[in-house]
Image (tube, rainbow, N blue to C red):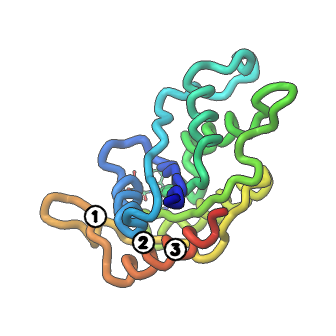
Amino acid sequence: MAESKPSILAIVGALRKDSFNRQLAAFAAEALGDRATFSELAFADVPLFNQDIEHPAPDPVRRVREAVKAADGLWFFSPEYNHGVPGVLKNLIDWLSRPVSETERQVLSRKPAAVSGVSTGMAGAIMAQDQLVGLLSLLNARVMNFPRVSVPNARQQLDTAGRLTLSDASRTFLQRQAEAYLKFLP
Ligand SMILES: Cc1cc2nc3c(=O)[nH]c(=O)nc-3n(C[C@H](O)[C@H](O)[C@H](O)COP(=O)(O)O)c2cc1C
């Protein structure tokens, strides 16, 4: 019987259509090739967290929880906003951090997670990554703390159409991260 492929759910910390982080996720999908299934979590419709609307969970929240539960692993691709995790991503994690029901724990627990990011600044989103690693660890995710990929200076790496082109060095690092994550997954 053929072994089934792991499913990896990409979580992109920016909502904008042409997000460099979404483009980085596409490079990661290439690096994984056909060894995993790879899809992106759509979460633009998740409302701002508010305990007044927590129960019953709004439909978009149920949907993202199911998607996270079903995935073998999560791979975060996030920019940093003002040296921190973008609010939309923190909001998503706040929803995911809450127990599903009285009998079902939150969906991030024990979930394997990889972290990467690209920014237009010099630091390649590493401060947001450090925060993200802390958050995910707090929530008992199994974070692959090494290797992590951070790509700085995105605007210096664009083609004439304004799309992100990765330097050979960044491609190599991303490939290494993909190989490590495939081994890290259960
Ligand atoms: C509100 C805001 C805050 C930002 N803060 C930082 C920052 O702290 N460090 C940094 O390197 N880039 C920062 N940037 C620039 C982002 O790196 C850049 O907008 C990047 O393209 C965002 O990722 P995306 O292309 O995936 O949307 C900031 C951008 C915004 C909109």
The image shows residue 168 at horizontal and vertical percentages of 32, 82
Mark earlier in primary sequence (3, 2): 2
Regarding ligand 1, which quadrant of the image does it lie in? bottom left
C-alpha span from label 1 to label 2: 12 Å
Mark nearer the viewer, 3 or 1 = 3
Mark earlier in primary sequence (1, 2): 2
Q: Nearer the viewer, residue 127 or 27?
A: 27
Q: Nearer the viewer, residue 29 or 165?
A: 29
Please state if 132 lies on the left or on the right of 117 as rendered: right
Residue located at (40% from left, 81% from top): 172
Residue located at (35% from left, 65% from top): 30
Q: Dot 1, crowdedness within 10 Å: few (<14), some or many (≥20)?
A: many
Residue carrying label 1: 164
**In contact (CB < 8 Å): disc 3 and disc 2:** no
Residue reaching furthest right? Answer: 102
Mark nearer the viewer, 3 or 2 = 3
Residue carrying label 2: 152
Residue located at (75% from left, 30% from top): 100
Residue carrying label 3: 177
Mark earlier in primary sequence (3, 1): 1
Q: How many marks?
A: 3
Q: Is mark 2 within 8 Å of ligand 1?
A: yes
The image shows residue 154 at horizontal and vertical percentages of 34, 67
For residue 130, what is the image quadrant? bottom right
Query: Vertical placement of 123 versus 91: above or below?
Result: below
Q: Dot 2, crowdedness within 10 Å: few (<14), some or many (≥20)?
A: many
Q: Which mark is residue 155?
A: none
Tell me the SS state at disc 3.
helix
